[in-house]
Amino acid sequence: MVMRPMKDTMRKALPLAGTAIVLAACLLAAGCTGQAPGGKDNETVQGIDLNGTAWDLVSYAQNSSMVNALEGTPVTLAFGENTTAGGSAGCNRYSTSYSVDGTAITFGPAISTQMYCMKPGVMEQESAYLGLLNTVKTYEVKDDTLTFFDEKGTAVLVFKKHVPPEPEPLVGTDWELQWYNDGDAVVSVIAGSEVTAVFDEDGKVAGSAGCNRYFASYTVNGTEMTIGQAGSTLMACTDEDVMKQESTYLRLLGTVASFSIEGEELTLMNANGTKVLMFAKAVPPEPKPLTGTNWTLESLHTGDAVSSVIAGSEITAVFDEDGRIAGSAGCNRYFATYTVNGTEMTIGPAGSTLMACTDEDIMKQESTFLSLLESVASFTIEGDRLSLRDENGTAVLVFKEAQAPVALPLVGTTWVLDTYHLGDIAVRVIEGTEITAVFGEDGKVTGSAGCNNYFATYNLSGSSLTFGPAGSTKKICAEPEGIMEQEERYLSILKAVRSYEIEGNQLKMLDMNGWRIFAFNAKV
């Protein structure tokens, strides 16, 4: 969303350079005239130089009385250079001009960003505040309180001097972009998109650019900062505005020359001192558990390049509590063992089915993925993202939590065999053959074993599943080659089944050790 254009003067005012304003009720004994009881004026300063001060709003006029500002949504006013002022109106950033003559003060029309905040009362308070600024005619400073009066001498806005909070550290804080300055306008981050930055101790900054993940190097010397050319994954999001915002953000990162942190706000400036990027501290979501979560791969890091997963392909990972990882490698199903010690992780050599997909790029991606799995030495989980890192700490594989599909019922679904296991080898069903299983409510399972139809009884108890002896028709099929041997194996292995699991449209049958021996997909 684009904000109304802001002049350079506003951008200089946005820093909140020293003090901030909070609304507080006007309780001055002499009707807010600035005169202390008894006619003395030893606590009140009129005509103070406001330049460089900042204030937090405490209260404002509403329906002929003063009401307290909402908690948790600070309204601020900072007086900058060249008679410019600005700050936060509670939801949006604003800027205005001002002029002072003794105790007389007036504000020019305010311009602001155009975000909408959902918290009740915030937008109404913001509108009232910006409207009241236009009514201000005089002011008074008493101790740490600043009061604005309208033309009738009635207090309309009351502030307290801003006490800057302890700044958050640059390193180790999750920063979320609020707005950026593209040179022509100050622009709010598009609603629903998320642009983030995390600076680490090794001089690397990374995060989400709105669509793609990005990474770059950075150096700091005091408040000076330079950020190297950013690399990123290469996904193409359908929202053109999000892609344009991403391009602008990555370009502006390269212009950064300095930074400042006030409380929970990080501002990055260019060589002219113009604020180009403003972040607020992000509250990291609760990390997902490693096991029991479905992970979908977002990017692979090979050498100096980060690659997005090929559009239309899907690489997944599910870690179970028994030290096994399995999923789709893009074409084939894969499986491996893993061990975890704190944040350390090792993954054993992966086995997989032996399909050959026609897309060579997908097969190359699959080979790269399986190779990178063996390089994993540690892992981190931040919110809904899992990063698998090599021994150098490089995130070689980055996954995002995937929503688990709704599990189909065992009974009444036609299940088609995808792979079966012979020891540690996963064998793909011969192309041109189909092995099926249909569980009836009468405790019988029927289907095709590839050549013949078969039938057997089955017993269910929770996730336990066993089969009785299987019978079948007596045809002999000559083609394709190996079909009769495959049928014999299938009917023989049925006897080893002891339990089952269903994840969405996938059925797994497991042996007494919990190892998968059959993998079925629901027939569409």
Image (cartoon, rainbow, N blue to C red):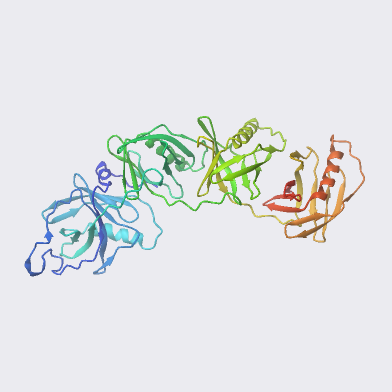
Q: Residue at x 56, y 45 (%)?
A: 341
Q: Quadrant of residue 347?
A: top right
Q: Does residue 255 appear in this view?
A: yes
Determine whether, in the image, residue 155 is placed left or right of residue 234.
left
* Farthest-out residue, left: 39
Q: Quadrant of residue 354?
A: top right
**Residue 225 pos. (x, y %):** 33, 36
Q: Residue at x 35, y 50 (%)?
A: 264
Q: Nearer the viewer, residue 341 or 181?
A: 341
Q: Nearer the viewer, residue 171 or 187?
A: 171
**Residue 275 pos. (x, y %):** 31, 41
* Farthest-out residue, front: 341
**Residue 377 pos. (x, y %):** 56, 38
Q: Does residue 518 appear in this view?
A: no
Q: Residue at x 76, y 39 (%)?
A: 427
Determine whether, in the image, residue 513 is placed left or right of residue 344.
right
Q: Quadrant of residue 474?
A: top right
* Farthest-out residue, right: 474
Counting every numbered tag in the picture gives 0
Determine whether, in the image, residue 368 is placed left or right of residue 162.
right
In the image, residue 30 sits, relative to residue 338, either above or below, namely below
**Residue 368 pos. (x, y %):** 61, 33
